[in-house]
Image: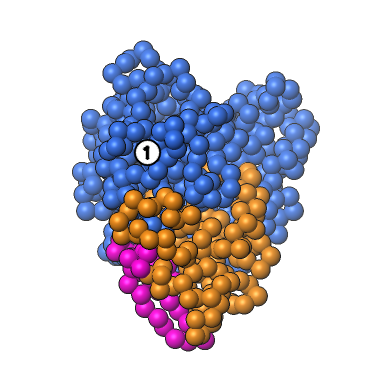
Chain colours: A orange, B blue
Amino acid sequence: MWCGKFLALPLIAACLPAMAVLGEPAAQVQADQIRLQASRSITPGVWERHTLRLADGSEITQWAQPGGGKVVAIEWRTHFKPRLDELLGRYFAAYQLAAQAGRRGTPTANRHLMLQAGDLVVENQERLQVYTGRAYLASAVNLRGAAQ
Amino acid sequence: MRPWTYLALGLLLALLTGCGGGNSTETTLVGPGGGGVVSQGQVASVDQPTGPNTADLVVDTGPSTGFALGVANVLYTTVTICEPGSATACVTVDHVLVDTGSIGLRLLRSSTSSLKLPAQTAPNGREVAECYPFVVGAIWGPVARADVRLGGELASELPVQLIDDATPQRFAAPPDCVASANGSLLASVTSLQANGILGLGQVRYDCGLRCQSGNYVGSAAVYDSCSSAGCQPTALPTNQQVAQPVARFAQNNNGTLIILPKLPATGVAVAKGRLVFGIGTQSNNQLETATQVIHLGTDPAAANYLYLTTTVDGQSFGQSYVDSGSNAFFFADASLSSKCAGGGSRWYCPSKATTLSARLSDSSGASASVSFDIVNADGLFGSGNVAFSNLGASTTADVFVWGLPFFYGRKVYTSIWGQPLAADGPWIAF
């Protein structure tokens, strides 16, 4: 999906792989770093934490099983609405359905969305040009534990 | 949430009890198609100040299809939009949502179809369309230039978004925009709960430098240049982006003041207030002696960027903000029951009214204390009223949203970053 829309941008002329996604191996994080033109830090622990920092101050953090294992949680604080279809991968369809159900009767300008769809938990908010949120697999991780 | 359950209960209460009493009663509101009493009840009003730098505000059942939308605490105003340079080729649109958490005017394209509004063009000469992302969904439609009148103030040649509610659309929404909308664009009165959105937030442009560069990597494109062949992401200079209307006024352009009445504990059917343009620019918008000013964070790399801090019972919420577009106090409090019978699981339904004390503060050390009540949401929604100063719901741990309930009984000033009085950073005051 990236390729078609961004071929004109010289820095990303090649068709780079999609983001490292929830529930999939963390091997894509390095490609994410290149594509987002971000700096990257890795913090070892019970969950390996990969943090990408962009020039505009945005930050995307992915928690994965050590050694490049499965991504179990993603947290973002960005100056753009991140592409959840890419971050959530195969969980995105369930997210969409839950989000559509959750917005019924909710004012358009309410700035946050919390939902659980099966194993997926998403907390998402925006205001002005700040977007924050997290997505995680409830069965795999307690996010508070991952954040440590 | 609760629309049909509470609609039914509200109807029953209305039929059983007549009207809600109080100082004044509202004219009976009639539902879609003219059938059935939907709501009768008390009106609370603030009718001052007046003047050319003011406009009416109302919290009521919403546009013509009103109560069926089932939303509470939505703040509306009326907007007049004209062809540039014309005082007669205009349409007036009521029930436009007033949102201090977003930027720019967005109206349903169908409501302006009688006007010939010039399209905003991209550097390649093609028409510009925008995908503006809210959390609950995204809005898609072309960008045009229009003269926008709010009260007696004029924003000339303002870039505005026309929410594309036509079939077929002027331009088909790109797939990444549909994904950003969680699969379904917000493009109707029903999905918007309004005829449009008036973003009166604290920056001047709705996207800024990211869109000026045109590098949308990591997100859906915000601005596209479009032709019959389709749409492609485009860079757009900030001064051509959808903009905060107030910042484009010739005067009274440094912020807004929202004044809403104090409400009884059970809420009211209609709350009327005043929207005042400018801060400290006229006799009717001066900061009062007791007004407390809280600055928002200004470092884009910091966690408190554009936030203030709220503390309740020793618990600190670092992502806190005052927002007319949110319809409740949103914060996490495990001591408040969220087991509501008729609504979703996020509303608070304590068995008795709960009073809480909070402190709003900023990094400079300024702070202000606020006391507020949370009452049972089931009871509020069952009243048939739609304006409540004590409606609360849970949200993410670090977040405290001072939504519309905060505004009742207060004067809330919202400055615009970059304008006089807020050149070094935005602030709110009350």
Q: Is residue A125 above or below residue B57?
A: below
Whether residue B96 is visible, yes or no, is no
Task: Name the residue located 49 percent from the left edge and 49 percent from the top edge.
Answer: B176
Picture residue at 44% right of the left edge, 43% below the top: B131
Q: Which residue is rendered at x = 65% and y = 33% of the image?
A: B67
User: In the current view of this chain or complex, which residue is farthest to the front?
Assistant: A14
Give the percent coordinates (x, y) of residue B161.
Answer: 41, 34
Q: B125 or A107: nearer the eye?
A: B125
Tell me the kind of residue under disc 1: Ser
Q: Is residue B148 above or below residue B363?
A: above
Snapshot quadrant of residue B158: top left
Asked if residue B427 lies in the magenta stretch, the reply is: no
Residue ID at (44%, 51%): A4
Give x and y (percent) for residue B17.
Answer: 75, 32
Residue, far top: B88
- Residue that mark 1 sits on: B225
Question: Percent position (x, y) of residue B181?
Answer: 53, 47
Q: How many marks?
A: 1
Q: Nearer the viewer, residue B411 or A83?
A: A83
Label 1 resides on the chain identified as B
The range drawn in magenta is A34-61
How packed mark 1 is, by other alpha carbons closer than 10 Å (few <14, some 14-19, many 20 or more), is many
Q: Is residue B233 visible?
A: yes
Identify the element where label 1 is drawn.
Answer: strand
Decide whether residue A58 is among the magenta residues. Answer: yes
Image location of residue A128, percent across then percent down: 39, 50
